Image: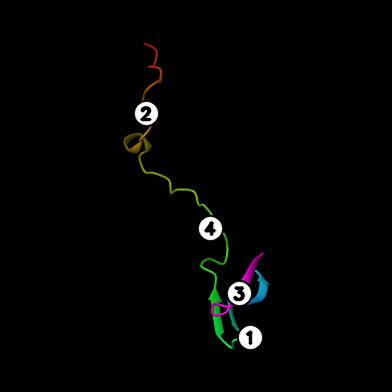
Amino acid sequence: MQDIRCGQCNRKLAEGQIITIKIKCPRCHTLNSLSATRAEPERHRASPPRANHEQQSHHSVAGRQAPPG
């Protein structure tokens, strides 16, 4: 959890996780508007399949064995 403090007088106004909030400080009467930059953690997606994997491969050929024959 994080402390939510007044931007003017630094008084602690709340504690928790925010998405969007507007809160007026009872001490200095400043209206504080806060919002999260991202509501949920970013999820990693699988990369799209490639049309021709052999031509677009960026893997090193070092250490590969040659086919027999």
Q: Secondary structure at mark 1?
A: loop
Q: Select label 2 or label 1 by which is in front.
A: 1
Q: Is residue 4 covered in magenta?
A: yes
In magenta, the rendered stretch is 1-9
Alpha-carbon distance for marks 3 and 4?
A: 26 Å
Alpha-carbon distance for marks 2 and 1?
A: 64 Å
Q: Secondary structure at mark 2?
A: loop
Toward the bottom, the furthest residue is: 29
Alpha-carbon distance for marks 4 and 1?
A: 37 Å
Q: Secondary structure at mark 4?
A: loop
Q: Is residue 5 covered in magenta?
A: yes
Sequence order check, earlier mark of 1 and 3: 3
Amino acid bearing label 4 = Glu
Residue 42: give its label.
4
* Residue 53 rendering spot, x and y as whole percentages: 37, 37
Residue hosting label 1: 27
Amino acid bearing label 2 = Ser
Q: Quadrant of the N terminus?
A: bottom right
Q: Secondary structure at mark 3?
A: strand
Asked whether disc 4 touches disc 1, contact meaning CB atoms under 8 Å apart, the reply is: no
Amino acid bearing label 3 = Arg
Please name whichever residue, 27 or 38, is drawn nearer the observer in this view of the structure.
27
Sequence order check, earlier mark of 4 and 1: 1
